[in-house]
């Protein structure tokens, strides 16, 4: 059930109506959110809801045990139970076959065939997100932060909250659990804000991301040697904006839905392509993941407190694992390594970026965007053969374009909307909110019909596969 589907429209409308009925009764409100979240998750594949429940039960129990246990050595072993459980699920469903493919060629030399050990299990949607979310909870409890949740129902809602369950933002316990212990902050203004975020996200997904994919990206990446060098360059730029609008669109919808229900989720994107260097990019892109990697991996490895050589190694390890988090394939590992190298170089050259000259700043932004865009090539290709074909197509230096004028129009719109600061749209939003309710309702209804019609055969959100 995608956010941009007619089924979700019916589902969320029903949730809102029932939510209004039980709003003032905390227990019933939490039960409704839990039921709705599991129903939403099970609409993909009901069998895998057990994994979500297992992760919830294990980490709730681990949190309670850590709170009672005072012996340091025992607390470490209890934490190991949580980490082993969560990482074990990820390893089994996401990485097991990948590592078997790596090991198999070496084993074949010995005359052995281990192909029978591969499994055909589906990758559960959202598993990378909710396992990181529950791991952050147990690690915080282990560290002594005041995030312990004694109410199992509220903890289960925290883990499974449907607006952000599938593709984030990755929410910390200290950000969300306190909100479940007070009445949801639902006002007319916040409901309007949430609704605008939902429609902004749908616009990003349906009008920009999906059209960029359909009109150019998918065709060019499928057959790179059939297009000119110019088309290959433009398609790569287009993919940079496709993945941004697709993923930030999902985040906008998730944040908007949560706000309509009275809850706040963290911002996940902040115009990443205006960054002046790669370090800044990672403070603007997928913020909930980058801060998670910083707080639970990079800093525990030693962070910036080690020797220059060790700091660079910490950066590389963090980005390699960040790349692997996105997918069990070598091109994701190379993508992570590429960003690790960029961050190492950026750290070495940190003192050389002191100029505040507008032209110099623009040049740094353009240079940074091109570095990021080349990385997206590693991210988008299906395998390394696809990558080599794409690079080979570049090397021909051919001009001309097979891409339509509609594509260039959508691409230009995407670039323009990205570089314009969001505050420039505030007067428009305020003007719209001041319109009569019937006028707003008519336009919203028309947009919903349009979005649903455009998405009948459109791809799901990119990050659903991670």
Image (tube, grey):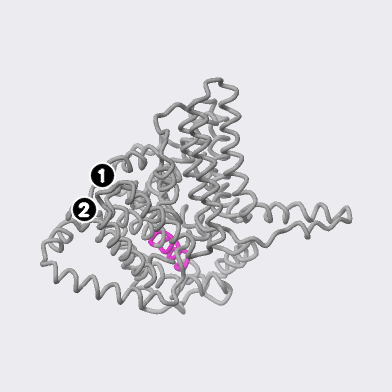
Q: Quadrant of residue 449?
A: bottom left
Q: Position of residue 346 (x, y in %)?
A: 47, 40
The number of numbered badges drawn on the structure is 2
Q: Compared with residue 264, is residue 376 higher up or lower down, i.e. above or below?
A: below
Separation of marks 1 and 2 at Cα, in angstroms: 14 Å
- Read off the magenta span: 234-245
Residue drawn at point x = 47 percent, y = 52 percent: 371
Residue 180, percent from left and from top: 33, 43
Quickly name the residue at label 2: 190
Mark number, residue 113: none
In the depicted view, which residue is nearer to us: 166 or 324? Answer: 166
Asked if 82 appears above or below 45 in the picture, the reply is above
Residue 305 vs residue 172: left or right? right
Q: Nearer the viewer, residue 308 or 160?
A: 160
> 10 Å neighbourhood of mark 1: few (<14), some, or many (≥20)?
some
Residue at 48% in and 29% down: 304
The residue that appears at 47% across and 57% down in the rendered structure is 373
* Residue at numbered disc 1: 183
């Amino acid at each position: 059930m995608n956010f941009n589907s007619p089924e979700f429209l019916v589902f969320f409308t029903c949730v809102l109506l029932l939510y209004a009925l039980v709003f003032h009764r905390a227990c019933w409100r939490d039960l409704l959110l839990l039921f709705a979240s599991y129903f939403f998750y099970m609409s993909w594949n009901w069998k895998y809801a057990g994994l979500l429940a297992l992760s919830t039960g294990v980490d709730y129990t681990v949190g309670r045990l850590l709170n009672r246990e005072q012996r340091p050595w025992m607390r470490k072993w209890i934490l190991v139970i949580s980490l082993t459980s969560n990482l074990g699920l990820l390893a089994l469903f996401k990485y097991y076959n990948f590592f078997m493919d790596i090991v198999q060629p070496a084993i074949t030399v010995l005359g052995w065939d281990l192909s029978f050990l591969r499994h055909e299990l589906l990758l559960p949607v959202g598993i990378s997100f909710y396992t990181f979310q529950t791991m952050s909870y147990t690690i915080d409890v282990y560290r002594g932060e005041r995030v312990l949740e004694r109410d199992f129902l509220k903890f289960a809602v925290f883990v499974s909250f449907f607006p952000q369950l599938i593709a984030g933002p990755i929410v910390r316990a200290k950000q969300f659990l306190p909100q479940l212990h007070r009445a949801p902050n639902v006002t007319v203004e916040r409901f309007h804000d949430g609704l605008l975020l939902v429609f902004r996200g749908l616009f990003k997904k349906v009008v920009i991301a999906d059209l960029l994919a359909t009109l150019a990206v998918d065709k060019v990446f499928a057959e790179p040697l059939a297009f000119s060098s110019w088309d290959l360059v433009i398609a790569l730029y287009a993919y940079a904006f496709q993945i941004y609008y697709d993923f930030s669109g999902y985040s906008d919808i998730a944040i908007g839905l949560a706000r309509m229900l009275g809850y706040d989720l963290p911002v996940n994107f902040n115009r990443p392509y205006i960054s002046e260097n790669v370090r800044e990019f990672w403070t603007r892109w997928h913020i909930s993941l980058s801060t998670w990697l910083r707080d639970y991996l990079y800093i525990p490895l030693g962070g910036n407190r080690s020797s220059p050589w060790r700091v660079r190694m910490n950066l590389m390890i963090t980005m390699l694992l960040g790349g692997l988090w996105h997918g069990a394939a070598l091109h994701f590992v190379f993508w992570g390594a590429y960003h690790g190298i960029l961050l190492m170089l950026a750290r070495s050259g940190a003192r050389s970026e002191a100029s505040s000259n507008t032209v110099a700043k623009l040049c740094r932004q353009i240079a940074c965007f091109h570095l990021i865009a080349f990385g997206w090539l590693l991210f988008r290709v299906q395998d390394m053969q696809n990558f080599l074909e794409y690079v080979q197509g570049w090397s021909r230096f051919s001009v001309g374009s097979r891409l339509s004028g509609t594509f260039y129009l959508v691409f230009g719109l995407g670039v323009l909307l990205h570089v314009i600061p969001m505050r420039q749209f505030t007067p428009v939003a305020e003007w719209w909110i001041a319109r009569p309710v019937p006028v707003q309702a008519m336009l919203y209804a028309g947009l919903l019909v349009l979005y649903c019609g455009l998405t009948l055969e459109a791809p799901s959100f990119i990050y659903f596969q991670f």
